[in-house]
Amino acid sequence: MNVTRYRAAVAENRREHGFDAVDGPTGEFDPVWATRCDDDSIGEAVVLATLVADPEPEPETLVRTGEAFRAVLADRTDADPERADGGGSPTSIGYVTLAVPDADPPLLDAMSGFTVARRRTCVFPLVYDLAAERLHRHEVPRLKGRGIYRRQAEDAERLFGV
């Protein structure tokens, strides 16, 4: 699959699953999609997602991209007027998917080793292998933190799996 077809399929998925295009500044990321939801295991959540085409992916690029998207997520959710209602803060979740020609092991290792939870945010860098037409996501752990990782698995498949 080529990146243009993949981007079109993800855009269709985001509309089907209630992700709306984000207006306003999103740094280097365009487009960015967002949704709010209630989840039985993690409560209220604000979710941002984006897709980045990277023809020559490096593990360091994945980490830099994930951290840059974390900054966008933190800025967007800190500025959210619904957070000022005193009812507690929603869980902030971000997905940044790198569409790459070939997902080599060092790139997947960087994805798995990425620190997901930091600064009141959870950012999941994902990798879509265009050649194999396969989405690589984070595995759901057996113990602690299962809810957020289970949510990630469901969102990843709904939005980025084609």
Image: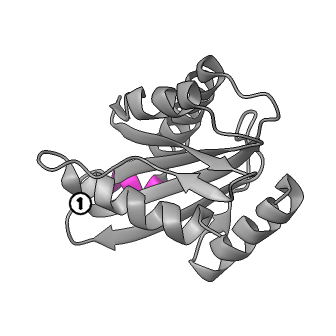
Viewport quadrant of the N terminus: bottom right
x 74%, y 52%: residue:
130
Q: Residues within 10 Å of mark 1 (few under 14, many from 20)?
A: some
x 22%, y 48%: residue:
141
Q: Is residue 86 visible?
A: no
Count of numbered circles in the view: 1
Disc 1, SS: loop
Tell me, what colour scheme is on the image?
Answer: one colour
Q: In the displayed structure, would residue 133 be above or below residue 78? A: below
Q: Is residue 3 visible?
A: yes
Nearest to the observer: residue 46 or residue 148: 148
Residue farthest toward the top in the current orientation of the protein: 60
Magenta-drawn stretch, dominant element (helix, strand or loop):
helix
Q: Which residues are magenta?
A: 81-87
Q: Residue 19 falls in which quadrant of the image?
A: bottom right
Nearest to the observer: residue 82 or residue 112: 112
Report the residue marked by disc 1.
Answer: 42
Viewport quadrant of the C terminus: bottom right
x 64%, y 50%: residue:
128
Q: Say if the magenta span includes residue 13.
A: no
x 73%, y 75%: residue:
12
The reply, left or right, for residue 146 in relation to residue 47 is left
Residue 108 x/y as whole percent = 52, 34
Residue 7 x/y as whole percent = 79, 60
Q: In the displayed structure, would residue 152 be above or below residue 138? A: below
The reply, left or right, for residue 58 in relation to residue 153 is right
Name the kind of residue labelled 1 in the image.
Answer: Ile
